[in-house]
Image (cartoon, rainbow, N blue to C red):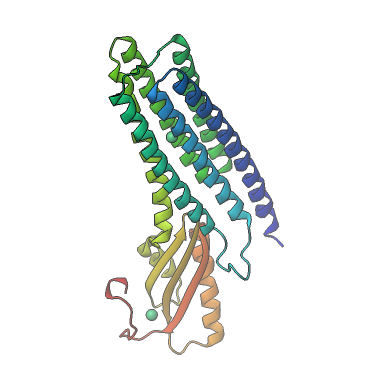
Amino acid sequence: MCASTPEVSRSNNHRAVRRVLIFTLAANLLVAVGKLAWGYHANIVSMQADGFHSFFDALSNVIGLIALGMATLPPDREHPYGHQKLEVAASMAIGMMILLGLLEVGRGVWAAATGAASPQVSPAAFGVIGVAIATSFVISWYEKRAAKRYDSMILASDAAHTFSDALAGIAVLIGLVLVRQGIPSGDIFAALAVMLFIGMTAYRVLRDGMIVLVDAALLDADAIREVVCTHPEVRSCHYVRSRGMPGSVHLDLHVTVDPDMKMEQAGEVLLEIKARLHARFSELEDVLIQLEPHHPVHYEDVPDNLV
Ligand SMILES: [Zn+2]
Ligand SMILES: [Zn+2]
């Protein structure tokens, strides 16, 4: 029963983070529409590219929302390890969509570079990109503040990303200035810079998914061993493996105790070790410990580098 208080504040946090993400998504979509509309109207290819960029950012906000939704779904019979990996499926799908979008943007840039049409840079174009840059700065600041208040990893990483979006906007702005100075290729170079930013979004989204898919180790085995060995009854600890997702880690390990120890006491030791691990690593979702009688020689078939 004593667990109810943190649960309540946790779901409150979820709701608040959700609100911030939805607001960010809406802002990204608005900015995307503005940049795409004006980019096509005035034939400014870098602004078109940046419009797609904002649209892809809105897509990556969708992953954040899915992740939040999954985090509140409890495990069930069909999904006893929880539902967090649905977020990975969404990440991979959206990452691939962004890559395809990048190809599409690249085709547009190529067409502009080889075509005859030249960008129409009016004061309104500066207005559109100026508002977009300001929006990115404000949202980034807003997300960063919310990330601190609600202790949210999703918001913190999105805040950093939104800040980089302002830089992409500044690249477009520089391109516009160059065009005004009589260098029409400035627009193309700015578009190439924006493509780099899109590539970074795709990389980030796909990398986060890959970390989970390849079961990358998420906790330092030595740090785990150190905590386990603080228990006076533990003789040794080996074969420490962690996997899962940041914030939701599954850990398994082998622990040896005195061969003459009674089962009853061994059970106590096991629970105490788990409690120590959970206290030290808040991201632990589940800990599986194989208790073994301590022998001088280890007979098991454990990979040498993991013993
Ligand atoms: Zn971006
Ligand atoms: Zn073992």
The quadrant in which the C terminus is found is bottom left
Residue that sits furthest to the right in the current view: 1
Q: Is residue 231 left or right of residue 72?
A: left
The answer to whether residue 229 is seen in the rendering is yes
Looking at this view, is 298 or 137 the one in front? 137
Looking at this view, is 201 or 260 the one in front? 201
Residue that sits furthest to the bottom in the current view: 260
Q: Is residue 284 left or right of residue 217?
A: right
* On screen, residue 63 above or below 219: above
Q: Position of residue 258 (x, y in %)?
A: 43, 85
Name which residue lies at 35% across and 13% down.
Answer: 177
Q: Position of residue 117 (x, y in %)?
A: 35, 18
Q: Position of residue 25 (x, y in %)?
A: 56, 36
The quadrant in which residue 242 appears is bottom left
| Ligand 1 quadrant in view | top left
Q: Is residue 4 left or right of residue 226?
A: right
Q: Position of residue 245 (x, y in %)?
A: 47, 57
The quadrant in which the N terminus is found is bottom right
The answer to whether residue 166 is seen in the rendering is no
- Count of all numbered marks drawn on residues in the image: 0
Name which residue lies at 37% across and 73% down.
Answer: 239
